[in-house]
Image (spheres, rainbow, N blue to C red):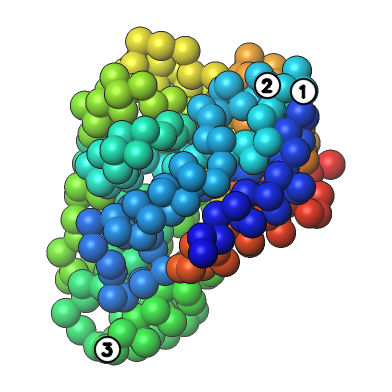
Amino acid sequence: MSRRPFTRALLSVVAPGGARGLSILVYHRVLPHADPLFPAIVDAERFSLQLDLLRRCFNVLPLPEALARMRTGSLPPRAACITFDDGYADNEAVALPLLRAHGLHATFFIATGFLDGGRMWNDTVIETVRRAPVDTLACDCLGLGMVPVGTPVEKRMAVDLLLGALKYRPMHERVELAARIADGSHARLPNDLMMTTAQVRSLHAAGMEIGAHTVHHPILATLRAPAARHEIACGRDALEAITGGKVGLFAYPNGKPGQDYLPEHVGMVRALGFDGAVSTAWGAGGDAFQLPRFTPWDRSPLRFALRLAHNLTYPAALAA
């Protein structure tokens, strides 16, 4: 017997519609095939299964429509939206065909400073660890000495260690130190991880929503106010120039309320004329400029749906 009616009934209880019960899922990458080094990253087969579940059990809406209906109290039961952060090339090459095959819409929040051959600092770290032709990385610049990377387990541990050591350093320092570790490893790093300008236009032409995600993906809470405002505004302006359309939605980089962004940044987004913004806080509620997002990690479709339902049972954190 299908568990779908039970799942839909449960979701209708926690997501009755009106002004509440909106689930916003967040993805970063959809790989063509599973990554043995990082098996938690969604691949095409797994993403397609998740889209099938969302299509069958939820009312999937474009995020701008969901935001407007939330404000008027007219959300349907089991409302959901799909979003992507950062601007990886596989979003257009792998995820877009699957979204179209399932008849679903998504919003893509893109950091414009990495388009056309750029690479985010965290990917410099990850790909250095993955591709290093040595068994240890010299990380004296971080006070970590020699970090082992000879086995898959060591590689995963090294990535967690290095990302943690760099994440909350000033933006220019993160980039510089990641590059120094990469240069010392002699690893050959890819320059095609992020979208091209043409791929952004392709997403827009396919009817997908394009959202702003700053230029260089800084932790806004670490910037002075003029620099933070510049990052927010210039990222939007660049995307509007690329697409020729309005960019009305924003995603806070990293997105933890009170840690990665502060109330002053919510005020900046409002003042710059955005229609709404999303965080990475879990839970339900929030306001139009701090909408929470959550994606279950479960491989079982039933557990995936149940975890989404559970996520709607407690309030999301806000920057306050």
Secondary structure of the residue carrying tag 3 is loop
Q: Residues within 10 Å of mark 3 (few under 14, many from 20)?
A: some
Residue 247 visible here: yes
The image shows residue 203 at horizontal and vertical percentages of 31, 28
Q: Which residue is mark 2?
A: 69
> Do tag 2 and tag 1 residues touch (Cβ < 8 Å)?
yes
Identity of the residue furthest to the right in this view: 320
User: What residue sits 28% from the left and 75% below the top?
Assistant: 36
Identity of the residue furthest to the front in this view: 1
Q: Is residue 36 above or below residue 175?
A: below
- Left or right of residue 286, residue 261 in this image: left
- Give the label on residue 138, or none: none
The residue nearer to you, when weighing 17 against 139, is 17
The image shows residue 225 at horizontal and vertical percentages of 67, 31
Q: Which residue is mark 1?
A: 73
User: What residue sits 31% from the left and 75% below the top?
Assistant: 37
The residue nearer to you, when weighing 55 against 197, is 55
Q: Is residue 134 above or below residue 256?
A: below
Using the rendered view, name the quadrant where residue 313 is placed: bottom right
Q: Nearer the viewer, mark 2 or mark 3?
A: 2
